[in-house]
Image: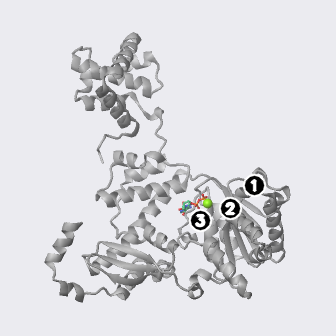
Amino acid sequence: MFPTDMNTFKNKNLNSLKLEKLNWSSIQNEMKNRLGLEIYESWLKKISFIDEFNNYILLSVPTRFIRDWITSRYLDQILQTVRNYKKEIIRIEFKIIEQDVKNDKTNIDNYELENKENVSFIKNSYLQYNRIDPNRRFDNFITGISNKLAYEASLKVSENISHYNPLYIYGGVGLGKTHLLNSIGLELKKKNKVMFISAERFMYQFVKSIKANDMVKFKEYFRNTDILLIDDIQFMNGKEAMQEEFFHTFNALLDKGSQIIVSADRAPNKLLRIQERIKSRFSGGLVVDIQKPDLELRRKIIQNKTEELNVLYFGQIKISEEIQEFISKEITNSIREIVGAVNRVVSFSRIYNKVPNLAETKVILKDLLNLSENKVTIDLIQTLVCKFFKISKNEMLSSRRSRYLVRPRQTAIYLTKILTSKSLPEIGREFSNRDHTTIIHSVKTIEKLKEKDPEMVDNINNLKNQILYNNSQNEI
Ligand code: ADP
Ligand code: MG
């Protein structure tokens, strides 16, 4: 870092540096164009410029949350924009300077109560618990057979309150439940008072209110809303007092025509330790589920996500068809993981400035893949072992007994034994019809060698890693 600083310094004289003060409002304008009005209005507008230094600028934001949000999502683009104006800037620092919350319209949204005392209570909790994510919308929710019903029901509710009441959406982890609830919230908050809270938060708020002897406010708070979105209701299990309160809130809201939307990881009748009457209330509305995405939807999500990132990164993102196909075939359980995989591949490309190949992709996504043993073929083992010992496959499979061939052959046999479920005769057949006693002998020899030869242990581990994850050491 130091040498760059010095060079910059040598190249420019101090005066010219001082003269070229950053024009923050032009930068903000450019960010508005780049990232879109919505992101700008929701997040970037809140950034104020404090000062610039030799190679960094100091900005301020009103809360830690906004800082974290901005740094995790938009920092790269902000820095790029700034650097268009001033190449010397290599980093951005944020300071948190709290503003008067009352003036911060977007945080309060459209939720106001008359009682002065209540206001701060509500504002505080509103800030903490009612974060509707502007990035999870209907228009970026991709549909397929598995989620179409849930999507359509959500859309319907957003257009026509009380149409299906309550709406109960359930499905496994990472399949888009929160995304849908969030989308409903975003739509409805344009005209209604919306409360979006996870069951865990509801519980926390409940307990806090009891301790503070504030139940009246709690009740008012939740019963004053037009729309109540409760995420992950399964977490309410067993908390009797809270369920009691929830049940009454629920009824009060339904009575006054408020819309309730609930998500859970399972169907109402499968909820554990939740009062029967609550379950039956849930079942009385519309219950829709989200299933695991099929291949077509997985492909669509990968394509869309890649395109979305391309808009952010000026068309520089390239994920080859092969990799897209790989991800869509290997990651099948959760859309969150699919999106995560695309993000990782993109981060890799950006960090290393190259598009990862398939082997690299496997390494990057290692923890998301179930590369199980049954995908390990004898052919793969033989190929990788030959490559490792620099012999040909013909040599490995030949009957020659030169030492430089015997060890690799035994290694391949050993690895086949431990990494596949093939029987000894089967393995023998794949190694030019060797007898199963030869196979046993090879396995025993390597096991013995491993006990006294650390290099052997290293080689085996290295090869194992390559075979299981197609990963050569230091490849990346
Ligand atoms: P859940 O609440 O069911 O665990 P989320 O709603 O948090 O899942 O979804 C996980 C991630 O996957 C989020 O980033 C979400 O935006 C994304 N996602 C889920 N389903 C879709 C979809 N159909 N289209 C686009 N993104 C989706
Ligand atoms: Mg969720």
Residue placed at 55% from the left, 69% from the top? 136
Residue pointed to by mark 2: 200
Crowd rating for badge 1 (residues with CA inside 10 Å; few <14, some 14–19, many 20+) = some
In percent of width and height, residue 461 lies at 36, 32
From where the camera sits, is residue 429 visible? yes
Residue pointed to by mark 1: 237
- Amino acid at circle 3: His
- Amino acid at circle 1: Asn
Q: CA distance from mark 1 to mark 3?
A: 23 Å
Residue pointed to by mark 3: 179
- Amino acid at circle 2: Glu
Q: In the rendered view, would you say 15 is above or below 92?
A: below
In percent of width and height, residue 337 lies at 51, 54
Q: CA distance from mark 1 to mark 2?
A: 10 Å
Q: On the picture, is 101 further left or further right than 47?
A: right
From where the camera sits, is residue 164 visible? no
Residue placed at 62% from the left, 66% from the top? 180
Q: On the picture, is 402 further left or further right than 160?
A: left
- Determine if the C-beta at disc 3 is less than 8 A from ligand 1: yes
Q: CA distance from mark 2 to mark 3?
A: 17 Å
- Depth order, front residue of 78/242: 242
Q: On the picture, is 396 further left or further right than 197?
A: left
Quarter of the picture containing the N terminus is: bottom left
Choose mark 1 or mark 3, whichever is in front. 1
Choose mark 2 or mark 3, whichever is in front. 2
Q: In the rendered view, would you say 227 is above or below 460?
A: below
